[in-house]
Amino acid sequence: MRKKVDFLVVGSGIAGLSFALKVAEHGKVCIVTKDRADETATKYAQGGIAAVMYSPDTYEKHIADTLRAGDELCNPNIVRITITESTERIKELIEWGANFDKTESGKFELGREGGHSESRVLHHKDATGAEIIRALLINARNHPNIEILESHFAIDLLTQHQLGVGVSRGMPEIKCYGAYVLSPDSTEVTTILARKTLLATGGAGNVYHTTTNPPIATGDGVAMAYRAKAIIENMEFVQFHPTSLYNPKEKPSFLITEALRGFGAVLKTVGGKEFMHKYDERGSLASRDIVARAIDTEMKHSGDEYVYLDATHLNRNDLIEKFPTIYAKCLSIGIDISKEMIPVVPAAHYLTGGVKVNEYGLTSIENLYATGETSCTGLHGANRLASNSLLESAVFSHRAAMDAIQTYKNEPHCEEIPDWNAEGLRMNEEMVLITQTTRELQFIMSYYVGIVRSDLRLQRALDRLEIIYRETEELYNKSIISLPICELRNLINVAFLIIKMAQQRKESRGLHFSIDYPDKASIRMNTRR
Ligand code: FAD
Ligand code: SIN
């Protein structure tokens, strides 16, 4: 089957939907999304969205905090663009119907999170993402130019090399014409031809065993772009959130928002001792790389499986009012957070690197954009400042939309693209192999490519990955195409990129900490192991 649209959007989180709503004013849009439309990382965002709203906050302060968190690897131009455009994008989310909490005086109630020097996080209690996705989806579902195909899985991009024409004009050599998309019945692959394509497929937390990310986060966009030969960068910088609820049987791990620390909760050892001031003068509100490594260090020294987050000194009514989701979740497993400390562990949370894009979200492949967690704009550098990712998605989806609207009419559909070739494939009878290999991969990444790394651990990971890469490619080439095998293949591609880029970085910086190159990070951490 073939289908033609002006704009193909892969993903229905904040990045995909906000782009779609803008380009839909100009042409036909098809959104493909591999699960229900609202099943996205966006929906689970708790803390909120950072933006400069009132004095004493200023753009300069938010810029300085972002640069500091990014450990000298941010692109200063991109940081300035993102932050100076933050207020406009917040206004737009509100116009689309998103509600953010206000104080009695009618001003926005701004939360505080790690690494921020001011309170600047707009939020909807502790369920900000669910509120944003609710508002965006209502608009998208009601838009006459937007078609949403749920449970449709983008397998690979449609690309063609330009036989050198583009290179001589100084343009990208490869052009994108849409994607091959698997239908929910898992047998039919549709060729969706588009003038412009957006990858907004979110993160890749499921490459690790313990993650806050929903199951959809399997790095599909990065893997598709990588196979299409787009430039990928900064993959070594995987952000581990310091505080996910320690509840070993639960997957994904439930997040305990940093906003709770911003509200006064404090990290303690199992023995009840505060420890964060040993590592950073900002204590429990240091930036995430530092807090996650500090917890990892404490757990390794003590042998404990978790540390505690103590909110028991905070006002009970405030806790219930401001953090209803967390309060209810913890109570459901027998913890009243106003009376008992919360056991927490770090969990893979955010893919800081991704598909390299310019200031308009354009990748190194012509007509292919990437925004949101899939992309690497240069905003986060070596470490993302809390609540900057929803903001980044909104800013760069807007910019990508503006760019795509200006140029899409000059881009014809490419009729020569062949349909998906399923010849020679037979039934896949080995589903259990896919599940087992996925688990194996997640353990390799968690054991050897976690918060603390070394050359030896990275090489072990690569050696093991090579075996499962070979086995999985063999299986893929002889199987009928299915979502699980495609996801596994994508996870393997992403794991490879993380390991290779981690091996290339001969220093410790931001989220990448290696015991073989402790330099800067060890000074800041005050710990050498
Ligand atoms: P997502 O919202 O993840 O959407 C990805 C979409 O792509 C989904 O619709 C998915 O189904 C679809 N998709 C993926 N692959 C395919 C494929 N092959 N074919 C078709 N569809 C596909 N950030 C903040 O700024 N503030 C916060 O408070 C915050 N809290 C967070 C809490 C949690 C628990 C988590 C997990 C993340 C949090 N983050 C937060 C990070 C932030 O939520 C994400 O970075 C952001 O929502 C990513 O948006 P996105 O649109 O790029 O991707
Ligand atoms: C949180 O609420 O702690 C998550 C915020 C983020 O990931 O930016």
Image (spheres, rainbow, N blue to C red):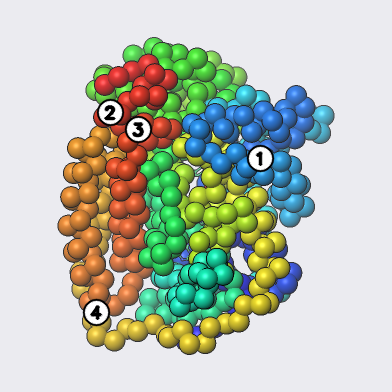
Crowd around label 3: few <14 · some 14–19 · many ≥20 (10 Å): some
The residues tagged by marks 1 and 4 sit, at their Cα atoms, a distance apart of 52 Å
Whether the residues at callouts 3 and 1 have beta carbons within 8 Å, the answer is no
Which numbered disc, 1 or 4, marks the residue that appears first in the sequence?
A: 1
- SS of the residue under disc 4: loop
Classify residue 443 by image quadrant.
Answer: top left
Residue on which disc 4 sits: 427
365 sits to left or right of 524? right
Whether the residues at callouts 2 and 4 have beta carbons within 8 Å, the answer is no
- SS of the residue under disc 3: loop
**In the displayed structure, would residue 522 be above or below residue 397?**
above
Q: Could you tell me which residue is drawn at 26 percent across and 71 percent down?
A: 476
420 sits to left or right of 121? left
Q: Could you tell me which residue is drawn at 34 percent across and 14 percent down?
A: 271
Residue 405 visible here: yes
The residues tagged by marks 3 and 2 sit, at their Cα atoms, a distance apart of 9 Å
Residue on which disc 1 sits: 80
Classify residue 425 by image quadrant.
Answer: bottom left
Residue on which disc 3 sits: 507
278 sits to left or right of 88? left
Which numbered disc, 3 or 2, marks the residue that appears first in the sequence?
A: 3
Of marks 2 and 4, the one in the foreground:
2
* Kind of residue at badge 1: Arg
**In the displayed structure, would residue 455 be above or below residue 489?**
above
Of marks 3 and 2, the one in the foreground:
3
